[in-house]
Amino acid sequence: DKIEPPHPDTKRLSEIFSELELRSLAKKYSAEEEENPTQTETEISDEPTDFFAADKTFSIIEDNGVYLISDGKTVCRLSDFSNLDGKKVIAHGSKKLYLKAIEENITVNIVFDTLLAAYILNPSETNYSADRLFAEFLSENRNSAGVVLGLQKLADKIKAKLEENGEMSVFSEIEMPL
């Protein structure tokens, strides 16, 4: 008779490795378990004509020199940076956005920065990429368009964690104003 090798519980291994912050092993066993079913592919479109007309909060990320923006429904390339003037924005890494706003001589109202908030939650972490934060907080893998589309959801999760840890005032009263 042929002896079958034991099959490890890859889901449980992935959970344990995630808990121990052994991300590469967690990712390996997660990928073995399910061929990346949570990968969210999102299309990038051109800006609709009335995209900036309504008073809403936009999500924005910079991806290899291109700014992707979302209103929670549509993802598009930001063609004219001046369209952000006075708009409320959720960003992942607001520093570049502020510099670009200064360069364009506009005011952007950044209401939440997921990168900065993640740093406050875990200052000893070395990787604050949006990909890692989506995996950690939402157990999702996303492409760049999917990241900008889901940034509000990620911000809500991180904000809840800041509040749970009693760190929201550090974020909103000290870090964000800087």
Image: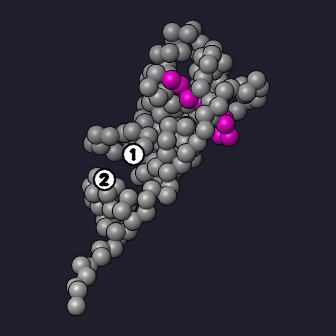
Q: Residue at 55% across / 45% down in the picture? A: 41
Q: Nearer the viewer, residue 55 or 15?
A: 15
Tell me residue 42's x, y (percent): 58, 42
Q: Determine whether the residue tagged by mark 2 lies in a helix, strand or loop.
A: helix
Would you say residue 72 sits in the magenta stretch?
yes
Tell me residue 103's x, y (percent): 51, 9
The structure's colour scheme is: one colour
CB under 8 Å between callouts 1 and 2?
yes
For the view shown, which residue lies furthest in the front direction?
A: 1
Q: Which mark is residue 56?
A: none
Tell me residue 148's x, y (percent): 55, 37
Amino acid type at circle 1 is Arg
Magenta part of the chain: 66-74
In the drawing, does residue 10 fall left or right of residue 158?
A: left
3D distance between C-alphas at marks 1 and 2: 9 Å
In the drawing, does residue 66 fall left or right of residue 18?
A: right
Tell me residue 17's x, y (percent): 29, 61
Q: Which mark is residue 23?
A: 2
Q: Nearer the viewer, residue 5 or 129?
A: 5
Q: Nearer the viewer, residue 69 or 31?
A: 31
Amino acid type at circle 2 is Arg
Would you say residue 38 sits in the magenta stretch?
no
Query: Reading the chain from its start, which is encountered first: label 1 or label 2?
Result: 2
User: What residue sits right under mark 1 in the picture?
Assistant: 132
Q: Residue at 56% across / 29% down in the picture? A: 68
